[in-house]
Image (cartoon, rainbow, N blue to C red):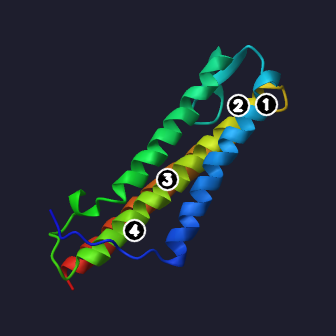
């Protein structure tokens, strides 16, 4: 366990918080305003190329936004206890503030990426259910996985670089 320090949020941190909150709100708004127009069976899973491959009752559309909201709240509480999180290098009094800042920014970026992915999926679900589209973009999954990998690798490299400094 590292020292109990609360890093100061930068403009980027605030921007990530706001974008994440807007994506979460947009997901809920989109579902609340389009739910009654959905067909009884909606796509609930897609293959890697964006083709719907499992359909289910439209009531299932609420599950993912509920989980997204729980994740959003959970990450909010993790921001209050950065000293209890895991780090790839030992946490000391001299590096704690910077390590916490990197880790918390990583969590914010992951939250934005996941919320954006879910919003995109819900837009696709509504469009497919209403007959406007037949599938999601084939680029959607590679972009998501690339973004996920990029965020994690950059975070790790920034922390590991501190070990050698």
- In primary-sequence order, the first of circles 1 and 3 is 1
Distance Cα–Cα, label 1 vs label 4: 38 Å
Q: Which mark is residue 154?
A: 4
Q: Quadrant of the C terminus?
A: bottom left
Looking at the picture, tell me which residue is in the foreground, 12 or 163.
12
At horizontal 79% and vertical 34% (from top left) the residue drawn is 33
In the figure, 14 relative to 22: above or below? below
- Mark 2 or 1: in front is 1
In the figure, 69 relative to 155: above or below? above
Distance Cα–Cα, label 1 vs label 3: 24 Å
- In primary-sequence order, the first of circles 1 and 4 is 1
At horizontal 59% and vertical 45% (from top left) the residue drawn is 117
Q: How many marks?
A: 4
At horizontal 54% and vertical 77% (from top left) the residue drawn is 11
Residue 32: percent from left, percent from top: 73, 33
In the figure, 71 relative to 87: above or below? above
Residue 50: percent from left, percent from top: 64, 35
Q: Quadrant of residue 104?
A: bottom left
Distance Cα–Cα, label 2 vs label 1: 11 Å
Q: Is any atom of residue 136 visible in this view? A: no
Q: Quadrant of the N terminus?
A: bottom left
Q: Is any atom of residue 133 visible in this view? A: yes
Q: Which mark is residue 111?
A: 3
């Amino acid at each position: 366990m590292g020292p109990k320090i609360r890093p100061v949020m930068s403009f980027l941190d605030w921007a990530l918080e706001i974008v994440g909150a807007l994506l979460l709100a947009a997901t809920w708004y989109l579902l609340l305003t389009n739910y009654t127009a959905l067909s009884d069976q909606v796509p609930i899973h897609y293959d890697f190329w964006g083709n719907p491959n499992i359909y289910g009752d439209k009531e299932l559309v609420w599950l993912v936004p509920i989980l997204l909201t729980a994740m959003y709240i959970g990450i909010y509480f993790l921001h209050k206890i950065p000293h209890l999180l895991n780090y790839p290098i030992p946490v000391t009094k001299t590096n704690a503030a910077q390590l916490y800042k990197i880790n918390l920014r990583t969590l914010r970026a992951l939250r934005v990426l996941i919320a954006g992915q879910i919003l995109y999926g819900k837009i696709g679900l509504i469009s497919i259910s209403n007959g406007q589209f037949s599938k999601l973009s084939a680029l959607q999954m590679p972009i998501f996985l690339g973004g996920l990998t990029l965020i994690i690798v950059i975070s790790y490299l920034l922390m590991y670089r501190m070990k050698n400094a």
